[in-house]
Image (tube, grey):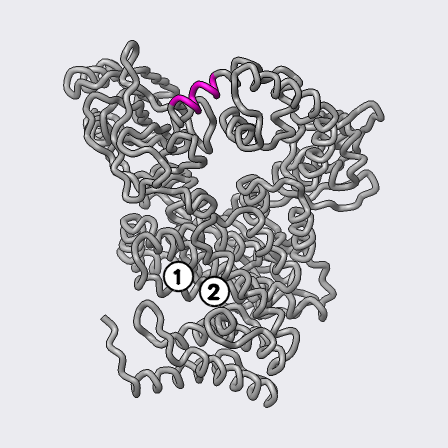
Amino acid sequence: MYLPDVEVEKSEIIKRYRNLLRVWKPRAPADRISVKKAFKMALEAHKDMRRKSGEPYIYHPLSVATIAAGEIGLGTTSVICALLHDVVEDTEYTIEDIRGLFGDKVAAIIDGLTKIKGIFDQKSVSIGAENFKKILLTLSDDVRVILIKLADRLHNMRTLDALSHEKRVKISSETTYLYAPLAHRLGLHAIKSELEDLALKYTEPEVYETISRKLKETAKGRSRFVNKFIYPIKKALTLQGFRYTIQAREKSIAAIWLKMQKKEVPFEEVYDIFAIRIVIDSPVESEKSDCWKVYSAITDFYRPNMDRLRDWISIPKANGYEALHTTVMSHTGQWVEIQIRSKRMDEVAEKGYAAHWKYKESMHLNSRLDNWLDRIKEMIESPDSDALSFIDDVKGYFFLEEISVFTPQGELRTLPANSTVLDFAYAIHSELGDTCIGAKIDKKLAPINQKLKNGQQVEIITSRKQSPKEEWLSYVVTTRAKTNIKLAVRGEKKKFAKPGKEKLAKWFLQCGIEFTNETIRKFQASVNFNSFIDLYYAAYQDKIGFKDVKIFGTASFNTGWKTPGSGKTPGAKPRIGAGAGQTEKFPVLQGILIPEEGPQGQIRFDVAECCNPIPGDEVIGLMSTPESPLVLHRTNCSRIHELITVFNNKMVSINWTNRESITFLAEIKLLGLDKLGLINEITKIMSNELNLNIKSLRIEAINGITEGIISFYVHNTSNIDDAMNKIMGIDGITNVTRINKI
């Protein structure tokens, strides 16, 4: 418990202010005066305020300003804004007060920060598309708003212990889903990594602690290996006259965990836990050639993997990142990744957009970051207002790698990885996309959905008879293409919406259902259409009919609930029942926060396809609409950060009750050496020893290696653990893992 000591706190405030000045390094007396004035104003405004930890509130803006200056590299205006970022929101000071004392630019940035805070602090609504658009609009107006917000979020994450468990999980999920990707796109690698690590600490504490402990336990061995590995490289670079630094950088804990999940391997089998970083002090005009000279020196000693060579100097990443990456084989048989950069490249890599801006004018850079901001503006103008689709589109641009392709005239175009011929066509011109029927890729014919690769030359083939179709949406990944296709398709649907509406009204009348906007909305949700126009168009095409309306009327007005599984909910599928011929039953879910409008006791639910929760798993329920069943997700679901962020107010905490009469489908994957009688051993364990009902058993042996997947029914996670432990005990089996997605 924090115990205030006024004198100690005063001393600490002065100490933190001096530390801010030290990392900021003011160049002009006028700047120092302005920052001091901002500090005094913040100190006065927050004098009676304390954080949840009990500490003086002024600690927070001082820390945010220090992060903005020292870890992001922002200047005087940003430091002032960081010191004052909560003043308008939390005190009696107004934007006009700020404007009068510090000018229009400071006032505009603080106004943007205040609006963002208001968006994220809303209790009753999820973040949603419109609110997220407001956040992104501030990015296009002045990127410093987002940079300061990232500094604010980083300090909040560093001091999250004072909050309740529920708030820590929500904030951490939001950080993982939105803030870390945003930091990545703005080139703030160090901040992105720390945000992900801190979020993992609160969402997966056991995982975080385990990996952290193992990193510490293996640190001395890595240090000995690195020193021996870099010795000949240092000797060669010194002889060639390079000024340089060499250091080994560990992967973040979150990155290691992601690799373990992706590869389905334990910590001990993650070979690239660290990378060697070589930073050379080289003038801008020769830094590219110097980096290649360093590469040449390295490959004199170690054999490179040519498939792992990445030249991000010739074509930098969209976030401004520049470097040469190579992976070489050490003399002990271990692959080692090496990153080669200049000092300028290193500063841009660590401090991102702020560092890039510092060099932009002097180097006359055509920033791909600026191009990315233009793309964001395009997304904001998209007609699609669905929260999930909009946020997913934008977020996809945060992490997607990029490819570079050429027009027939030799013009270079940059697109997200997995872009197709159709994406390329729309990137050039909307009319070219609308009439595209194919392409010539490197002089060879290709369809419109052909994925493009780096370095290809693409010539679009068109026809005036061609027009956009709804299935095209599955062919494209860029927002520009999706927007143009949706606009064209929507225009086509509007032509037939009126006769479709008339058909639907007739069916409603026949079923005795009042044809109002409210009943149409409920019916739209039950048959899973995004808009009234889509619904009316489906009625016109007879994709829905009188039977669907009749089922809706019966379910809605007799029980107040849809028939379980009758409507789609995000990531959901009908729950596996107890077996053929048995009546479907629903367990009682003891929720911490069962919604008042929802039914009590016997709760109708679906399990999410993405994580397949089973009794014993920690779960969260999503109630997308009052009419839809509860959708259960595991708390470690791959989509949980997204769901908590977007559907915050619709999430409920759930506890399972013990119902041995109900079974759930589970799957496990096994790997091992092929041997005679393996299937017999497995079935004996599952059926005779554990009394578990196997649905399917798929075993394949190739070149002496056996891989298999077992589907079986369980009552809870204990059944899965027992099965995995028993099978792992079979001679020759090397690995058994649970499959989350069924």
- Mark 1 or 2 closer to N-term? 1
- Please give the residue where the numbered disc 2 appears in the rendered image: 246
573 inside magenta stretch: no
Is residue 707 shown left or right of residue 181?
A: left
Is residue 178 shown left or right of residue 220?
A: right
Residue 18, horizontal then vertical, whole percent = 44, 84
The span picked out in magenta is 551-558
Residue mark closest to the camera, 1 vs 2: 1
At label 1, the amino acid type is Met
Instruction: Point out the residue furthest to the left here.
Output: 689
The label on residue 303 is none
- Depth check: give the residue in front, 390 or 398: 390
The secondary element bearing badge 1 is classed as helix
| Image-quadrant location for residue 680 | top left
The label on residue 157 is 1
- For residue 296, say whether it is visible: no
Is 163 rendered above or below residue 181?
below
Instruction: Point out the residue furthest to the bottom here.
Output: 29
